[in-house]
Amino acid sequence: MAAHLSYGRVNLNILREAARKELREFLDKCAGSKAIVWDEYLTGPFGLIAQYSLLKEHEVEKMFTLKTGRLPSADVKNIIFFVRPRLELMDIIAENVFNEDKLHSTRDFHILFVPRRSMLCEQRLKEQGVLGSFINIDEYILDLIPYDGDLLSMEYESAFRECYLENDQTSLYHTAKGLMTLQALYGTIPQIYGKGECARHVANMMLRMKREFAGIQNQILPVFDTLLLLDRNVDLLTPLATQLTYEGLIDEIYGITNGYVKLPPEKFAQKKQGEASKDLPTEPKKLQLNSAEELYAEIRDKNFNAVGAALSKKAKIISAAFEERHNAKTVGEIKQFVSQLPHMQAARSSLANHTSIAELIKDITTSEAFFDNLTVEQEFMTGVDTDKVNTYIEDRIAQKDPLIKILRLVCMQSVCNNGLKQKVLDHYKREILQTYGYEYILTLNNLEKGGLLKPQTSSRNNNPTIRKTLKLWMEDANEQNPNDISYVYSGYAPLSIRLTQLLARPGWRSIEEVLKMLPGPHFEERQQLPAGLHKKRQQGENRTTLVFFLGGVTYAEIAALRFLSQMEDSGMEYVIATTKLINGASWIKSLMDTPEAQMH
């Protein structure tokens, strides 16, 4: 089912299997027929661990979404609530249970908290008078979910917001626990490097947890050589920029959720000859995107400008393969051709899908609006006129463009200028509030707290030094045959990935000065391995680094790390983990506040 998880350097299927085993064990605790009531946010991530078939094998007959009022009727013995530990969800559960109790006295209720039990939530259930109704109250520790052969995500949406706005370190605790689970399965990671306040906290928690388990020696040969913990606020610029890889653009334009994308259906309608086109589908076309699909794995990390050529090359190969049927003369040859047919047909339909997606994206990337926006982004990245009010941004506000687009640009200008002059900042704020509404004052406040949009505190702007020392802007980036990570943003090398690259070679000592200019401490820790578990490295064998982004990572950054893994002379392979897969829009949205949102 999830073979693509085991193709990489590290077999991430082991993690998925461990999660499945635990789920089965919990379901078997609740003997008899079952209905699951889902906290809607969990259904996507769970789908990557277990399909409905697994649940059915364990007598799950019905599934409902958690909502207020009464539960739909179901003739089952057990009702299991799968929920995140959130107080507002406890009130809904209490209402559901009350209504059920009036009707059926023989029901068994169970609750499964994902990823941790919470005393506060249990207290709330007690106050509501329903705690005693639950036979099992348990936790299902699902921290890191395998998304692909080299990618893990916690899908913890509010991690950045909690850490930087609310000073809440819950997500960091979950991260440390997730890394402990990983080490239990894949061996102790001997070297830990980190940059940023949150990274420091996670490393401290991991080392403390390790001391608490001091008696239990982990006898697994380490799979990872190094763990690098990176705070998102060390590099606030990268997620604000428009990603220019194929996968990055799909995410920017349509949004990828739990490995799926929903696309406009009319582009995918199969029209038969002579048929009227009035029956076009209205449901969005839902496609799964991961490396299990050969073509997608090949093109997803390319700069979009290189995708067209790759698709037409693939089209030639596929049509040549179909032409082979004319050369099949003997029974053996015909049999051989027929056996390859399913694979060839899958390749052909995959090509048709990606050609359609590429056409959809091309319509946008060739538009004037896209080009103008990108031009301003690239001016900011190269330090052009970052200290004064930008006329393009003013125009876009006057045209009432989507607010998130405006906020991305203004934040980008602020980040590239190390804060804006008070006069410039006030001008932007006034324009935004007058155009979009005064309720967004809370959002502007949040962006300031998170360091994205702030007044200049010192006259010194370190960005030019950082840009120069780390070579963050490369003129004439080669988009077709890249030789540097900057191809993912057509010229801008993501700071986060440059730091990762330099850690591997020549090491961070070479950039001490620049590291000091970036927020938060940088550090190195070593974890003792039990005797006999030190790796004997074979000649030419690559090292493996797990890079953990605290606060989110973009698909373009993932593409840049995959590029580094594939470089002939890098000697390093990367596995990526994060609290959440993000893009500029989803990230800013997670920091937005309107009074209505707070009411619910």
Image (tube, rainbow, N blue to C red):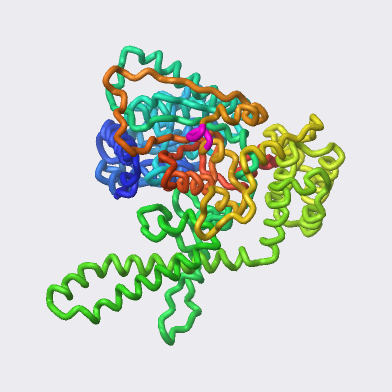
Res 222 → quadrant: top left
The residue shown at (50%, 27%) is 193
The residue shown at (55%, 29%) is 508
Q: The C terminus appears in which quarter of the rendering?
A: top right
Residue 115: x, y in percent? 43, 31
Quick check: is 18 in the magenta stretch?
A: no
Position of residue 487 in the picture relative to residue 342 (left or right)? right
Residue 204: x, y in percent? 50, 19
Extreme residue in the left direction: 331
Position of residue 186 in the picture relative to residue 414 (left or right)? left
Q: Nearer the viewer, residue 546 or 597?
A: 546
The residue shown at (47%, 48%) is 563
The residue shown at (48%, 40%) is 155
Extreme residue in the right direction: 423
Residue 4 drawn above or below residue 443: below
The span picked out in magenta is 502-506
**Residue 102 visible to an observer of this rendering:** no
Q: Main secondary structure of the magenta part?
A: helix
Res 319 → quadrant: bottom left
